[in-house]
Image (spheres, coloured by chain):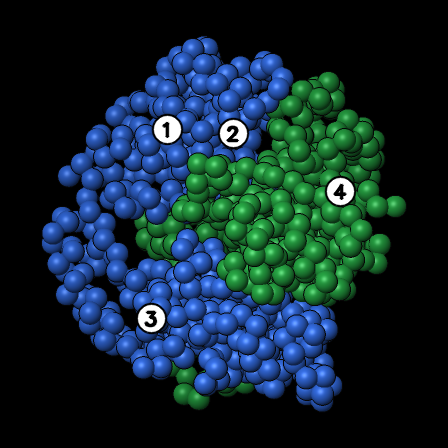
Chain colours: A green, B blue
Amino acid sequence: MEKINTSIITIGDELLIGQVVDTNSAWMAQELNKIGVWVNRRIAVGDVWNDIWNALDETAKWSNIILITGGLGPTADDITKSLLAEYFGGKLVMHEPTLEHVTYLFEYVFKRPMPLLDRNRRQAEVPDVCTVLKNEIGTAPAMLFERDKKIFISMPGVPHEMKSIMKAQVLPLLQRRFQLPHIAHRTLLTAGVGESFLAEKIQDFESDLPSHIKLAYLPNYGMVRLRLTATGEKKIVEQELDKQFPQLKLLVNEFLVTDEDISMEVVVGKLLKEKNKTLATAESCTGGYIAHLITSIPGSSNYFKGSVVSYDNSIKEDVLKVQEQTLQTVGAVSEQTVTEMLQGVLKMIKTDYAIAVSGIMGPDGGTEEKPVGTVWIAVGSRERIETKKLHFRFERLRNIELTAINALNLLRSFVLQES
Amino acid sequence: MEKINTSIITIGDELLIGQVVDTNSAWMAQELNKIGVWVNRRIAVGDVWNDIWNALDETAKWSNIILITGGLGPTADDITKSLLAEYFGGKLVMHEPTLEHVTYLFEYVFKRPMPLLDRNRRQAEVPDVCTVLKNEIGTAPAMLFERDKKIFISMPGVPHEMKSIMKAQVLPLLQRRFQLPHIAHRTLLTAGVGESFLAEKIQDFESDLPSHIKLAYLPNYGMVRLRLTATGEKKIVEQELDKQFPQLKLLVNEFLVTDEDISMEVVVGKLLKEKNKTLATAESCTGGYIAHLITSIPGSSNYFKGSVVSYDNSIKEDVLKVQEQTLQTVGAVSEQTVTEMLQGVLKMIKTDYAIAVSGIMGPDGGTEEKPVGTVWIAVGSRERIETKKLHFRFERLRNIELTAINALNLLRSFVLQES
């Protein structure tokens, strides 16, 4: 099997001045992995002629697959297409099928009442040395160049356009052109234990692993994901991982959240669906983020009914029926308040389970007794309630995220305890 | 002024298999920009000896500032520290002040009951050819290497640790070491107009710009941000931008959302605060995401009171008092339903304004009459209500995001119309 080296080049000043977070590369890498393409390197450069040119030159030295995104827009700062024409020794020519497609999009999909602008027409120009890969949902087509058995594919940077082109054109093309190995992963998620402590527990397992199986620790949101990766012939690597993975699971069993590569909100959703139970949330400090996480999953309407975001104390009192006395004596961030919020939301939104949270996310609002990062969580049903106090030390958004993930995990254990 | 070239190298398999989106680089680039450092290139490589080594070699050829993050954890997959020791011709030695700091963190901050593990002690080892930069909030210190007047700084990849080290150590150090130019940006946000149409409107302005001022188009969420960037001597570039930016604003005035580089939720928050008005939301299809966006901003409790996430129709009826007949005749995704949701939430959560949304986010739930992506939005007060129907063509999460941003923008125009 020939050695395949792959690079992703992303083009755009916005990536270099930090105005935009590059989510494209992560998605591309994931999809490439699934078909057996390991991404060796990702490079981001600005809309700068020499920087793009040099990135292509350096990358071409050792990669045989070079995927390029961005810099194909209709405006003057987008120079990628002219550069690629020059780089591959061609010139820009009108590509009639693309022009028809652009005209169609403006007329029937974007429904723009105005005639096609010159700059929109120019979207249909391509270097005469490329093969055009159609962009079904956008105006800038993708372009395939070949040189010295290396493949260069330039795609627009708009995420949904790039994704559509990758799925319909690029991934199948790579599968046809290259003999790809099989890359297999097994991932599990743990909670309530640090990376170092996990590493101690599994160090014998880790040192006994054959050299072509890699173990990675991926800490996030106070949880740690462990991932085994093996590359090679499909049947063999799958068999090996099927042997190794159960051992790993056993070693970390007491901290195991899931043995699938899924997020906490998916884990909780699956559990509720499986048990045919429903959920509601009463959120103060998370401001709807828990409800958002849950409802970001398709099909969540099967188990999630709704939420009351009681950001202001008046809503805690008027809507969730938290007692005035509770708020006055122990305050909004207290075990008693989240308990009453939970009871209130269960009564209002008649679900089997509920989550209630209240805390101080910062940067302001902390006191000596209740510093920024103090959180109370309650989870439970009409019959039983469990509460937990947590303390986070991070910035606002991360405190919100950590509160949400911990609340979902507390609910998960609660539901599992129910017979 | 010497020419400064800067690269960021991020290390970690998780970045290359797409399990983690790299938010560090964007943040770093932003902060570097503020002190006049333009990032020329970002490279991401895996936890692979040769790939890291080659990235260092290539980058060192033409950069004088090389910032490295990741690969410094306590587990076996983290090889960056050993590699840096070898790369710079040193060996790992125990750094006593760091060991004291690690011991302190475990005892008093993480409050781990167990004795320090060997692998935690090894976090305090550093190459004897580096200068240690203290990591106040984590165990892995940052390390400064110098060679041929080039600066290499290796930092942990944990975002809040990296940020703390950048702010406390790296940025001041770069300001001391290099004579940095001034990079100035002016950014405005438009809504309701496409990139091509904007480009037509401002093409004379664009072609008249002096060559050292760059104009960038940054489309996102159906809005377009326009950014002017100038680099040079502070007084001069600020003056030039202060002359050019008002002209640009004037040209796009009818589509202008804000002339600051802030997000829609911040724009709306500022407006409400300025007018001393309060807001609530009633969310069906967005599942709490609008409330989350608003409450992700510090100080939002001044104007945001709460939300009812009426994901299930029973909540629309029982809590928001949408009439059963409405749901039965015109359905949950209709002008009448969002109007009644709005009236319901205004009555419940006594605010000046409210937002109500209902739609079909996909992938399931669409019908011929109401396909996936159909959304109704209502914004208003007790006196006046405005509604809008929208149709998005994307995947679930993006449909949710677009609905939220459009709802906030509709509220913004509504509030501006009120005298």
| Label 4 to label 1: alpha-carbon separation | 42 Å
The residue at which mark 3 appears reads as: B275
Q: Are marks 1 and 2 in contact (CB under 8 Å)?
A: no
Identify the amino acid type marked 1.
Ile
Identify the amino acid type marked 2.
Gly
Query: Subunit of mark 4?
Result: A
Q: How far across and down, in percent of the image, does residue A310 sit?
A: 56, 60
Q: Is residue A307 left or right of residue A273?
A: left
| Label 1 to label 3: alpha-carbon separation | 47 Å
Q: Are marks 4 and 1 on the same chain?
A: no
Chain-order first, disc 2 or disc 3: 2
| Label 2 to label 3: alpha-carbon separation | 49 Å
Quadrant showing the N terminus of chain A = top right
Chain-order first, disc 1 or disc 2: 2
Asked if B329 appears above or below A69 in the picture, the reply is: below
Disc 4 on helix, strand or loop? Answer: helix
Q: Are marks 1 and 2 on the same chain?
A: yes
Identify the amino acid type marked 4.
Ser
Which mark is nearer the camera, 2 or 4?
A: 4
The residue at which mark 2 appears reads as: B71
Residue B259 image-quadrant placement: bottom left
Label 3 neighbour load within 10 Å: few <14, some 14-19, many 20+: few
| Label 3 to label 4: alpha-carbon separation | 45 Å
Label 2 neighbour load within 10 Å: few <14, some 14-19, many 20+: many
Q: Are marks 2 and 3 on the same chain?
A: yes
Query: Subunit of mark 3?
Result: B
Query: Subunit of mark 1?
Result: B
Residue, x 38% and y 23% (percent of image)? B134
Label 4 neighbour load within 10 Å: few <14, some 14-19, many 20+: few
Residue B246 image-quadrant placement: bottom left
The residue at which mark 1 appears reads as: B153
